[in-house]
Image (spheres, rainbow, N blue to C red):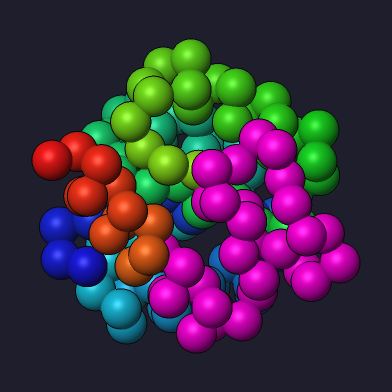
Amino acid sequence: MSGVVALAVGYDPVLLQTRTQVLKSAGYTVVAEQSLKRAIARFLEGDFDLVVLCHSISQDDRHRFADFIRGHSPRPPIVFVSSGLVQYDASADLTIDNDPKDLIWGLRELFNEQELTSK
């Protein structure tokens, strides 16, 4: 996915690092943050095509952050990466299982769908 810049946010440093590497290996440019405060600052500084939220972030924090994102820019889709226990998050545009293959496949489908609807 050349040209796609993602903001990945998660409280667990190991999960965040692993997910960042998975996204980078699929061709995404990734900015990773471990706190919502830093993620908000980065979002305001940057031009992101995608926001990826980890299941290590509480549901309340995810919802607040998603509301903030949508209040500033309706453009980037928000993707929630589930631990497998949560099947759906209403604050996200897409909920994807934590498996790296599922993540990459789901993101490709999301961007293909967006490309089709923008034509």
What span is in magenta?
A: 79-107
Q: Which residue, as the protein is rendered here, is positioned at the far right?
A: 85
Q: The N terminus appears in which quarter of the rendering?
A: bottom left
**Residue at the (51%, 72%) spot, across then down:** 103
Q: Is residue 104 magenta?
A: yes
- Residue 67: give x, y in percent of width and height: 60, 22
**Residue at the (70%, 38%) spot, across then down:** 90
Q: Nearer the viewer, residue 5 or 117?
A: 117
Q: How many marks?
A: 0
- Residue 22: give x, y in percent of width and height: 43, 79
Q: Is residue 94 magenta?
A: yes
Residue 72 is left or right of residue 53, and the answer is left
Residue 106 is left or right of residue 9, and the answer is left
Residue 4 image-quadrant placement: bottom left
Q: Is residue 21 above or below residue 75?
A: below
Q: Is residue 13 visible?
A: no
- Residue 62: give x, y in percent of width and height: 69, 38
Residue 27 is left or right of residue 8, and the answer is left
**Residue at the (52%, 37%) spot, across then down:** 38
**Residue at the (32%, 82%) spot, across then down:** 25
Q: Is residue 113 above or below residue 78?
A: below
Q: Nearer the viewer, residue 69 or 74?
A: 74
Q: Which residue, as the protein is rendered here, is positioned at the far top?
A: 71
Q: The C terminus appears in which quarter of the rendering?
A: top left
- Residue 96: give x, y in percent of width and height: 60, 64
Residue 44 is left or right of residue 82, and the answer is left
Q: Is residue 23 visible?
A: yes
